[in-house]
């Protein structure tokens, strides 16, 4: 066994699903490392968690940067810890036509949603095996669908699903659990970052329920978790109807949201 203490590494922990997952992991007795750019929020969350247990390690890192994952690895080593669990929650989306949105921002979305997630998923495999842990990758039901007016975001989440399912099979041989969490709309800051409130109210779920479902699924070794009945139905329907029909429906719905965003209505 390694002399380093096992820890649950959670990215995008400053708000939303990431913060909720941090509270759940802490409540179940895991030592936590919180990662995000907004260090003041991480410190506030760490202080909250510390009232009932060990204070989490706070790591300020921008995973859109090429050396973001390396900075995390160095901070963990300095603190004398190594991951037992890796939770890749950091990510963002943008609403708008791909040809009209800022190209640099869209490439940054790929860096965060795909490159950084891939790096952190494979970087700590040896320590995950030593501690019989696992990986929880946060995708979306968007990953089952084509995504006009959020083309890059939907594509990145499709990658996360495919990559995570493959890792689930590969790493099972080493006793490592890999679960992909595919929520639908959740009441978080995601809509604000995307540029509009994109969540159909009928499908929206409380962030705590989504995080709890993800944690339970990881601990049970489930390949995929889709919280909420309506969200499960969407993932099933996506494969039953012709792709052209699904594309047309989403195109019409998303173009209306984009029009509302542009007009401020």
Image (cartoon, rainbow, N blue to C red):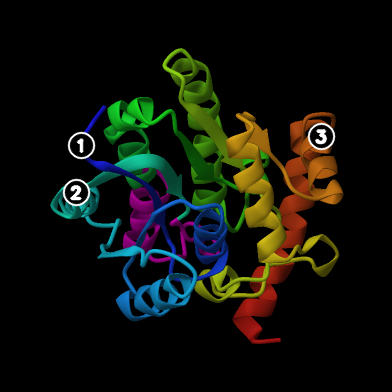
Which quadrant: the C terminus? bottom right
**Residue pointed to by mark 1:** 3
Element type at mark 2: loop
Disc with the residue nearer the chain's start (2 vs 3): 2
Residue 91 magenta-highlighted = yes
Distance Cα–Cα, label 2 vs label 3:
44 Å
Disc with the residue nearer the chain's start (2 vs 1): 1
**Residue pointed to by mark 2:** 80
Identify the image quadrant of residue 14: bottom left
Task: Determine if residue 185 is in view.
Answer: no
**Residue pointed to by mark 3:** 236
Q: Position of residue 259 (x, y in %)?
A: 67, 74
Looking at the image, the residue that sits furthest to the top is 173
Between 8 and 168, the one nearer to me in the picture: 8
Give the residue displayed 49% in from the left and 60% down from the top.
Answer: 22
Give the residue displayed 41% in from the left and 16% down from the top.
Answer: 174
Task: Determine if residue 74 is in view.
Answer: yes
Q: From the viewer's perspective, is residue 260 above or below residue 200?
A: below
Which range is magenta? 90-114
Q: Position of residue 169 (x, y in %)?
A: 52, 17
Foreground mark, 2 or 3? 2
Give the residue displayed 51% in from the left and 41% down from the top.
Answer: 136
Q: From the viewer's perspective, is residue 92 above or below residue 14?
A: above
Q: Position of residue 168 (x, y in %)?
A: 52, 24
Element type at mark 1: loop
């Amino acid at each position: 066994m390694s002399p380093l203490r096992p820890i649950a590494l959670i990215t995008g922990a400053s708000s939303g699903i990431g913060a909720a997952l941090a509270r759940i992991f802490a409540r179940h007795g895991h030592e936590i490392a919180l990662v995000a750019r907004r260090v003041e929020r991480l410190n506030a969350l760490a202080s909250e968690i510390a009232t009932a247990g060990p204070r989490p390690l706070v790591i300020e890192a921008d995973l859109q940067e090429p050396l973001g994952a390396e900075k995390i690895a160095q901070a963990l080593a300095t603190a004398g810890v190594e991951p037992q669990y890796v939770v890749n929650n950091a990510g963002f989306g943008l609403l708008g036509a791909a040809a009209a949105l800022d190209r640099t921002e869209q490439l940054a979305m790929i860096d965060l949603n795909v490159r950084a997630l891939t790096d952190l998923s494979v970087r700590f495999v040896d320590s995950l095996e030593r501690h019989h842990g696992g990986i929880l990758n946060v995708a979306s039901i968007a990953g089952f669908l084509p995504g006009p007016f959020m083309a890059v975001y939907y594509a990145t989440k499709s990658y996360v699903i495919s990559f995570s399912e493959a890792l689930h099979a590969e790493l099972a041989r080493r006793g490592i659990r890999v679960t992909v969490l595919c929520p639908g709309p959740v009441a978080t800051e995601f809509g604000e970052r995307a540029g509009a409130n994109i969540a159909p109210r009928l499908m929206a779920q409380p962030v705590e329920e989504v995080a709890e479902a993800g944690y339970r699924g990881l601990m049970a070794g489930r390949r995929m978790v889709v919280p909420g009945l309506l969200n499960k139905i969407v993932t099933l329907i996506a494969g039953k109807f012709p792709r052209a029909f699904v594309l047309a429906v989403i195109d019409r719905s998303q173009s209306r949201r984009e029009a509302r965003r542009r007009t401020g209505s």
